[in-house]
Image: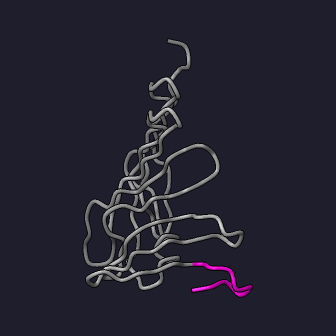
């Protein structure tokens, strides 16, 4: 699949009924690498950016309309930067599926030294996530 200007948007391969995909932005930078089957992402979605973080979503479970994953982000040192829970809508278009992500439950932000910087509790209300509680930890220990 290509953008209107002819640049590659997706590189897809099928393997035993599973779509393996690489998604690129309009400048040709790799954005996502993942696997897709039966209207949902499976296994792990790897997310690439230019900020020096490693990001990925480990797909945990599925029900009739949604599937769920744990978002993990790491600093360049390998220490966790963020851990949060996500819900996705099932669908046939990978961009729409990825774009449907909503936070729910606990999101933890870690400081570079490994200590917890903040915690937020999210609740899904309709088609959006709302913060229902937030705790910001003192930076002096």
- In the displayed structure, 18 sits above or below 82; it is below
Residue 58 locus on image (x, y percent): 34, 57
Taking the spot 42% from the left edge, 47% from the top edge, the residue there is 72
Q: As rendered, which of 56 and 135 lies closer to the eye?
A: 56
Residue 37 locus on image (x, y percent): 32, 79
The secondary structure making up most of the magenta span is loop
Taking the spot 52% from the left edge, 76% from the top edge, the residue there is 95
State which quarter of the image contains the N terminus.
bottom right
- In the figure, residue 79 lies in which quadrant? top left
Residue 140 locus on image (x, y percent): 55, 13
Q: As rendered, which of 128 and 14 lies closer to the eye?
A: 14
Q: As rendered, which of 134 and 4 lies closer to the eye?
A: 4
- In the figure, residue 91 lies in which quadrant? bottom left
Query: Can residue 122 be found in the magenta stretch?
Result: no
Q: Examine the rendering and report whether any part of residue 38 can be seen.
A: yes
Residue 84 locus on image (x, y percent): 41, 48
Residue furthest top in the image: 141
The span shown in magenta is 1-9
Name the side, left or right, on which 30 lies relative to 135.
right
The type of colouring in the image is one colour
Name the side, left or right, on which 69 lies relative to 16.
right
Q: Examine the rendering and report whether any part of residue 135 can be seen.
A: no
Taking the spot 65% from the left edge, 70% from the top edge, the residue there is 25
């Amino acid at each position: 699949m290509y953008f209107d200007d002819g640049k590659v948007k997706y590189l897809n391969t099928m393997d035993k009924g599973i779509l393996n995909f690489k998604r690129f932005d309009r400048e040709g930078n790799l954005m996502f690498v993942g696997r897709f089957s039966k209207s949902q992402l499976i296994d792990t979605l790897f997310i690439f950016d230019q900020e020096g973080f490693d990001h990925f979503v480990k797909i945990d479970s599925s029900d009739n309309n949604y599937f769920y994953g744990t978002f993990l982000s790491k600093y360049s040192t390998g220490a966790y930067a963020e851990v949060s829970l996500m819900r996705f809508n099932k669908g046939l278009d990978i961009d729409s599926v990825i774009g449907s992500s909503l936070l729910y439950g606990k999101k933890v932000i870690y400081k570079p030294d490994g200590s917890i910087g903040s915690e937020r509790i999210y609740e899904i209300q309709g088609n959006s996530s709302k913060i229902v509680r937030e705790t910001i930890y003192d930076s002096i220990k």
